[in-house]
Image (tube, rainbow, N blue to C red):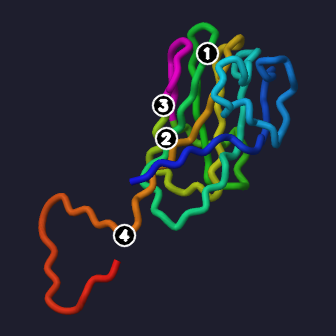
Amino acid sequence: MSVVVLYPSLLIQVDGSMQTMNGQTIESGNLGFLSDGRSDTGVEFQSNNSRIAFVPDILRTSQIVTSIELQVDLVSGTKTTLTLKGSNNPEAEVEDFHLLGTYQGGPANGISFVLNNTTDLSSLRLSLESSTGEFEMSEVAIRVVLKDPGKILLNEGKIILGKGKIIL
């Protein structure tokens, strides 16, 4: 099993009042501040129910995706509800994305959302919404677990090959 980490790469839209932590307008094509490993850069949710929607990096692989997990670092603010929504439909409006998970609490590193029943990264689009303004998010990472090629894991049972050969 191998792990690949993807990051937000393309901005779809921003709803509510939101800017970068250094006061700049959030622009499409430059979301590197959400993946630079620094807690002093990122986005500030300035108004209640502000939302950022994005597309993650493209992953080109022939390996099977076994799981996808989104990790978020919230670095300042008060208690909030952070809502993750997403869609594999490239035509879906952000408002119509499906609920994938919620986090309730204060600032924390490594907040994890497991994207159950989602293994297609080709058209994945995600949004994060904070119920409370005055909240800062510094990092967003999408951890993708891939099945190693050429390996068969048999936890129980047996395999019987009566004739022929197996080529991996």
Label total for image: 4
- Give the secondary structure at mark 4: loop
Q: Locate the C terminus by quadrant.
A: bottom left
**Residue at label 2?**
69
Question: Under tag 2, what secondary structure?
Answer: strand
Residue that lies at the very extreme toward the bottom in this rendered image: 163
State the residue at coordinates (61%, 56%): 59
Locate the N terminus and report the quarter of the image it occupies.
Answer: bottom left
- Mark 4 belongs to which amino acid? Gly
- Residue density around tag 1, few if under 14, some if 14–19, many if 20 or more, within 10 Å: many
Front residue of 89/11: it is: 11
Query: In the rendered structure, does residue 105 fall within the stretch colored magenta?
Result: yes
As drawn, 159 above or below 97: below
Q: Nearer the viewer, mark 3 or mark 1?
A: 1
Q: Position of residue 133 (x, y in %)?
A: 70, 13
Q: Which residue sits at x=81%, y=20%?
A: 17
In the rendered structure, which disc, 1 or 2, sits on the residue that comes first in sequence? 2
Q: Are marks 3 and 2 in contact (CB under 8 Å)?
A: yes
How far is mark 3 from mark 1, CA to CA?
15 Å
- Judging by the rendered image, the residue that carries numbered circle 3 is 112
On the image, numbered disc 1 is attached to which residue?
A: 75
Q: Which residues are magenta?
A: 101-111
